[in-house]
Amino acid sequence: MKKSSKLIFCGLYYLTVLVSRFKKLLSTKTKLLLYKAYILTHFTYCPTVWMHCGKTAAGKLEKLNERAMRCIFNDNISTYDELLMKANMPSLQNRRIQDMCILIYKVIYATTPTPISGLLSLRSNECNLRGKMKLILPLKSKLTSKYGLHTFRYYGPKMWNSLQDEPRTAPTIKRFVAQIRKITFDTCSCFLCCT
């Protein structure tokens, strides 16, 4: 994982350098379009793997994203959150959680391959007490921090169950994506944010 993440960091670094070279020649709108087309696609590729890449790698990704935002807006004063608000984008960590919820939605509505759908199971509710479309979490006592707690199988259902009923019961994937992109997961309880 370290070798592949180092290659990705180097590639992303050179893409941000390329944007910074042309920051005076291109308009902010054009730089933002280039960023979304070429750089953001690398940041958001395979989010379920990057979700559990570790605090150091996640921090490096956020720093590279911040550098790219600073180049786009020619702004060295604003905070990272202010730059993200200017671009109307969530942080990379937030985006990974949103993408994971989209994958879970696809699993529940059977639009993913069988190996992925075998990781999750839907809770059957006779009584409608605490929401609809909740997933069963694996028993925490059987999981360790090395084998289980930092996996898609545990963390995915935990984040899915924290959603309100409205997005979870969206009738179409398009509507679900529109609703999930509006949600900000500020109180993230993953090991990246807690440690």
Image (cartoon, rainbow, N blue to C red):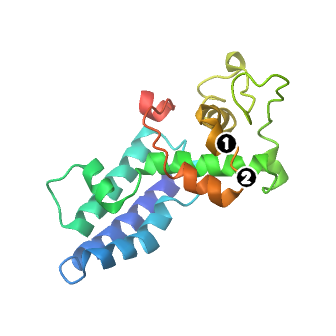
Image quarter hosting the C terminus: top left
For mark 2, give the secondary structure.
Answer: loop
Left or right of 140: which side holds 45? left
In 3D space, how far apart are the residues under numbered discs 2 and 1 (Cα atoms)? 9 Å
| Label 2 CA crowd tier, 10 Å (few <14, some 14–19, many 20+) | few
Residue position for label 2: 171
Going 49% across and 66% down the picture, which residue do you hit?
A: 41
Query: Considering only vertical position in the picture, is 137 above or below 133?
Result: above
For mark 1, give the secondary structure.
Answer: helix
Query: Considering only vertical position in the picture, is 195 above or below 165?
Result: above
Which is more foreground, mark 2 or mark 1?
Answer: 2
Q: Residue furthest left?
A: 77
Q: Is residue 1 visible?
A: no
Q: Which mark is residue 168?
A: 1
**Would you identify the image quadrant in which residue 166 lies?**
top right
Residue 38 position, x and y percent, is 44, 73
Going 79% across and 50% down the picture, which residue do you hit?
A: 109
Going 69% across and 29% down the picture, which residue do you hit?
A: 131
Residue 154 position, x and y percent, is 66, 32
Q: Is residue 156 visible?
A: yes
Residue 62 position, x and y percent, is 36, 50
| Label 1 CA crowd tier, 10 Å (few <14, some 14–19, many 20+) | many
Amino acid type, residue under disc 1 in the picture: Arg
Residue 155 position, x and y percent, is 62, 34
Amino acid type, residue under disc 2 in the picture: Pro
**Would you identify the image quadrant in which residue 174 lies?**
bottom right
Q: Which mark is residue 184?
A: none
Query: Considering only vertical position in the picture, is 184 above or below 130?
Result: below
Residue nearer the viewer, 194 or 128: 128
Query: Considering only vertical position in the picture, is 19 above or below 140?
Result: below
